């Protein structure tokens, strides 16, 4: 059974139950109201008769009493129970002296009272009239009940059908997307605040993410193949060159050095790819340890002095004497190496690179600043994408694959940190990495 049918069935059952309860309440209330009204009429007639009957010189005097009106019989007795006025009928119940109380023997409502002259006034009303009215109400309820249930079912069907029209449209659109295998298509229900419109909007957002993921995966596969093909081609060519000059030791050593460089490049590329893949899967688990970040910056700066010296670039730093943090030292090292290597690579000869450390309470900020060629605003948002490289003219000697900053971002995410860049063409760049000083303490 479809959801629409289930909703209509349950809606009809609940409406039918509510209708039954409502009609039962109406019948019960009608019975109470009719009896109350009958008692009030009976009391009024008896009260009027008490006022209009009295004794004078031992004789009964009556002033305008209707002994039968609107189904109410009036009788007047003396204190001995002798009937003085009014109709008598064998069907009437025996006289009782429950003064002021309405009694019901199943056939008659009876009210007996005594006036100031000691006369007993009794009013009687048959109950079958009330029963007939209540019966009519019950019959009418039984007639109306199926009509109400049918209208509830019909109304529920139209309400559910109209409410599920967007869902039907969404299903049709989804089927078309599946059949056409075109992730660029969308459900596109348009404006609406109900749950189905919000669900369709969520599916469209999911399709946006899926399309973006597939495009990135497609681009990733293409770029990875291209980047790996280049060193492999060089290795293959150098092997052939070495084999053809096996008698020349110098040429063989040159070929082997080239093969070794390309092997290092492939290892770096594969390592970056693995780190990014782990970050994407959420399995890039940091290995926390306590270390002095200031000492780490000094070690990394020292290891890059030769590379900076080739371009007469000065590396300096602004940092406290000591800053102990708890983090993954390997990841922090790779971030520093990437930031500083890029700064050296994209800074002209005679330039400078400045490393700043800031203790911001629970967070630590590493900033690497240079006076290099800078990055345009258009490219700043894209440099964190894998395999993305800004205009190759930034550095003719660039040998990167465009994975360094993507890897940095993945590591920042793994360390619950963040990355950012401030730059302008011709005015240098400032790359920032912020991460928790003591994530274990924060977790507590």
Image: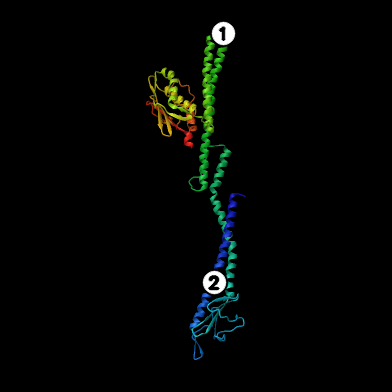
**In 3D space, how far apart are the residues under numbered discs 2 and 1 (Cα atoms)?**
125 Å
Residue 103 percent location from the top left of the image: 57, 76
**Would you place residue 169 above or below residue 148 in this image?**
above
SS class, disc 2: helix
- Determine whether, in the image, residue 423 is placed left or right of residue 275: left
Which of discs 2 and 1 lies nearer the camera? The answer is: 2
Label 2 crowd bin: few (<14), some (14–19), many (20+), radius 10 Å: some
Could you say which disc has been placed on residue 351 in the image? none
- Determine whether, in the image, residue 356 is placed left or right of residue 131: left
Q: State the residue in front, 294 or 101.
A: 294
**Would you place residue 53 above or below residue 133 in this image?**
below
Residue 334 percent location from the top left of the image: 48, 26
**Would you place residue 321 above or below residue 70 in this image?**
above
Could you say which disc has been placed on residue 34 in the image? 2
Could you tell me which residue is drawn at 47 percent across and 36 percent down?
A: 442
On the image, numbered disc 1 is attached to which residue?
247
Could you tell me which residue is drawn at 44 percent across and 19 percent down?
A: 307
Label 1 crowd bin: few (<14), some (14–19), many (20+), radius 10 Å: few
The single residue placed furthest to the top in the displayed view is 247
Residue 352 visible in the current orientation: yes
SS class, disc 1: loop
> Mark 2 or mark 1: which comes first in sequence?
2
Could you tell me which residue is drawn at 55 percent across and 20 percent down?
A: 232
Could you tell me which residue is drawn at 59 percent across and 49 percent down?
A: 3
Residue 384 visible in the current orientation: no
Residue 121 percent location from the top left of the image: 53, 82
**Would you place residue 200 above or below residue 367 in this image?**
below
Residue 124 percent location from the top left of the image: 56, 79
């Amino acid at each position: 059974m479809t959801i629409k049918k289930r909703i209509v069935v349950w809606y009809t059952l609940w409406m039918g139950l509510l209708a039954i309860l409502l009609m039962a309440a109406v019948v019960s209330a009608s019975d109470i109201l009719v009896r109350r009204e009958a008692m009030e009429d009976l009391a009024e007639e008896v009260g009027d008769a008490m006022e209009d009957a009295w004794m004078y010189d031992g004789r009964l005097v009556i002033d305008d009493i209707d002994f039968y009106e609107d189904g109410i019989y009036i009788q007047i007795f003396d204190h001995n129970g002798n009937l003085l006025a009014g109709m008598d009928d064998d069907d009437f119940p025996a006289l009782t002296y429950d003064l002021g109380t309405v009694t019901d023997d199943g056939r008659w409502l009876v009210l007996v009272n005594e006036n100031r002259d000691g006369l007993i006034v009794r009013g009687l009303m048959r109950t079958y009239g009330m029963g007939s009215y209540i019966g009519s109400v019950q019959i009418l309820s039984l007639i109306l009940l199926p009509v109400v249930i049918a209208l509830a079912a019909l109304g529920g069907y139209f309400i559910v059908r109209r409410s599920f029209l967007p869902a039907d449209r969404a299903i049709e659109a989804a089927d078309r997307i599946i059949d056409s295998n075109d992730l660029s298509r969308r459900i596109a229900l348009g404006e609406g605040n109900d749950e189905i419109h919000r669900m369709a909007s969520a599916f469209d957002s999911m399709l946006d993410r899926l399309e973006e993921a597939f495009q990135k995966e497609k681009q990733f596969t293409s770029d990875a193949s291209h980047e790996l093909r280049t060193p492999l081609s060089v290795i293959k060519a150098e092997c052939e060159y070495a084999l053809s000059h096996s008698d020349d030791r110098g040429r063989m050593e040159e070929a082997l050095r080239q093969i070794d460089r390309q092997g290092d490049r492939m290892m770096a590329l594969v390592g970056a790819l693995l780190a990014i893949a782990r970050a994407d899967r959420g399995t890039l688990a940091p290995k926390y340890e306590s270390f002095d970040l200031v000492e780490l910056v000094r070690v990394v700066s020292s290891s890059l002095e030769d590379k900076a010296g080739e371009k007469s670039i000065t590396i300096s730093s602004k940092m406290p004497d000591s800053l102990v943090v708890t983090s993954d030292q390997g990841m922090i090292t790779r971030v520093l190496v990437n930031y500083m290597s890029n700064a050296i690579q994209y800074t002209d000869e005679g330039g400078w690179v400045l490393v700043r450390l800031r203790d911001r309470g629970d967070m630590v900020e590493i900033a690497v600043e240079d006076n290099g060629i800078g990055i345009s605003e258009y490219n700043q948002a894209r440099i964190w994408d894998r395999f993305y490289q800004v205009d190759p003219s930034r550095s003719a000697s660039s040998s990167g694959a465009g994975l360094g900053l993507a890897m940095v971002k993945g590591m920042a995410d793994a360390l619950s940190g963040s990355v950012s860049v401030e730059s302008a063409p011709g005015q240098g760049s400032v790359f920032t990495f912020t991460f928790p000083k003591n994530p274990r303490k924060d977790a507590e």
